[in-house]
Amino acid sequence: MTNSPERRPIGIALNGVTGRMGYRQHLVRSLLAIRADGGLPLADGTVLWPEPVLVGRNEAKLADIAGRHGLTDWTTDLHATLARDDVEIYFDALTTQHREKAVAAAIEAGKHIYSEKPVAADLAGAMTLVRAADQAGVKVGVVADKIFLPGLQKLKRLVDSGFFGKVLSVRGEFGYWVFEGDWQPAQRPSWNYRAADGGGMVLDMFPHWHYVLEHLFGPVTAVQCVTRTHIPRRFDEEGIEYLATAEDAAYAIFELPGGVIAQFNSSWAVRVFRDELVEFQVDGTHGSAVAGLRHCRAQARTATPRPVWDPDLPAGTDQRGDWSTVPDNTVFENGFRVQWERFLRHVVAGEPFPWDLRAAARGVQLAELALVAASEGRRVEIPGLP
Ligand SMILES: NC(=O)c1ccc[n+]([C@@H]2O[C@H](COP(=O)([O-])OP(=O)(O)OC[C@H]3O[C@@H](n4cnc5c(N)ncnc54)[C@H](O)[C@@H]3O)[C@@H](O)[C@H]2O)c1
């Protein structure tokens, strides 16, 4: 007969758990999914058991979520939660605008931090958190979920194999139509379209593009950007019309080491004629690939057809047919859960975790300098952080 492994509970305060990301991806798809599978096994044989403490402003919403998932620990008192010894980690999925203050309070209380991106609304705020966390000696991880998308993992495999030869350029196409909220409800929160509430495409998506590019090709060294608010008026969750003060589209050129150019279109005012809501095309001397959320297709130099420009002839070539599918070769788990598991092992077992606060601050820096580039109409170089 074998002894059942020792279970080590770890208290995690989840703030913002009534929101889209906090509830679905972090509570349900990550922490509760880990519990449903019996906990997180560690190398020393113990099993880590997440104990969520739901934190928020609305008692009824918290009680409803807790009741739905058999949880009992919920509160509207963040400070009392941060004073609890059994709470070791503070997780933040608040709206961007409110993150810095809450994370700073948790650092001061000596909690390890796991946070949604962007970790702060500007670089100064992010660096304040970096210094505070260093001083307190707490561990900080920030969500970098796109790296764990199956499509991007396959793209990374191609990069690591040398498939591309010399990488020349990257094109990112991200976006979809976000309904204005009048004749159909909007599918994103209204704060996303108000600058004063921390909204805007650049602050929302450029931290993602930063870690994706850094992970695949190296740090972004310079940025040019044009932003637009294509839809100037929208309707909020209560059906009330409001002025969209934040940009809903950003058209950027990022410079990368080795002369690589990455050109990204990001828009909530575009209709999708693509296979997936985001696609990255990488062109290199020896091959090209197009990766989306799940799929990745590649065309090697040796399999490249000879295109000939002749508008007088009907298009006779099945361009997509000449690309091959990059196989999965593994089972891909939910990326948010994979990153949670790595962060938990980082906290309790000291395993490495590269997506730390400094990495997140570089993402905020890219967003901030892209907005400078946009407002001043110029190319901005990205200096290294202290
Ligand atoms: N990693 C990703 O792919 C991804 C995707 C979307 C959003 N996000 C990030 O996640 C965060 C949350 O986004 P969301 O779409 O879930 O937003 P949301 O509006 O659905 O949820 C926000 C949460 O913050 C809480 N909140 C709002 N105002 C508050 C206040 N004044 N005081 C305390 N709590 C308050 C809300 O009650 C809710 O729980 C944002 O920072 C966003 O950038 C990340």
Image (cartoon, rainbow, N blue to C red):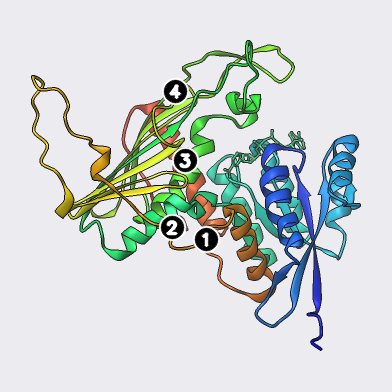
Question: Mark 2 — residue?
Answer: 328
Q: Quadrant of ligand 1?
A: top right
Q: Are marks 1 and 2 in contact (CB under 8 Å)?
A: yes
Q: Which residue is mark 4?
A: 271
Q: Secondary structure at mark 4?
A: loop
Rate crowding at label 4 as few (under 14), some (14 to 19) or many (20 or more) other CA atoms within 10 Å: few
Verify CB contact (< 8 Å) between mark 3 and mark 4.
no
Q: Which residue is disc 3 drawn over?
A: 206
Quarter the N terminus occupies: bottom right
Which amino acid, mark 3?
Answer: Phe
Q: Point out residue 213 in the picture as x, y percentages from the top left corner.
A: 39, 50
Mark 2 or mark 3, whichever is nearer to me: 2
Amino acid marked by disc 1: Val
Compute the Cα span from label 1 to label 3.
28 Å
Label 2 crowd (10 A; few <14 / some 14-19 / many >=20): some
Q: Position of residue 201 (x, y in %)?
A: 50, 31
Tell which of 184 and 364 is nearer to you. Answer: 184
Give the mark nearest the N terminus, 2 or 3.
3
How many angstroms separate mark 2 from mark 4 (CA)?
28 Å
The residue singled out by tag 1 in the image is 331
Q: SS at mark 1?
A: loop
- Can residue 146 be seen at all in this image of the molecule? yes
* Residue occupying the point 56% across, 66% down: 353
Position of 38 compared to 260: left or right? right
Res 179 quadrant in image: top right
Q: Which is more N-terminal, label 4 or label 1?
A: 4
Indicate the secondary structure of the residue bearing disc 3: helix
Q: Position of residue 252 (x, y in %)?
A: 36, 34
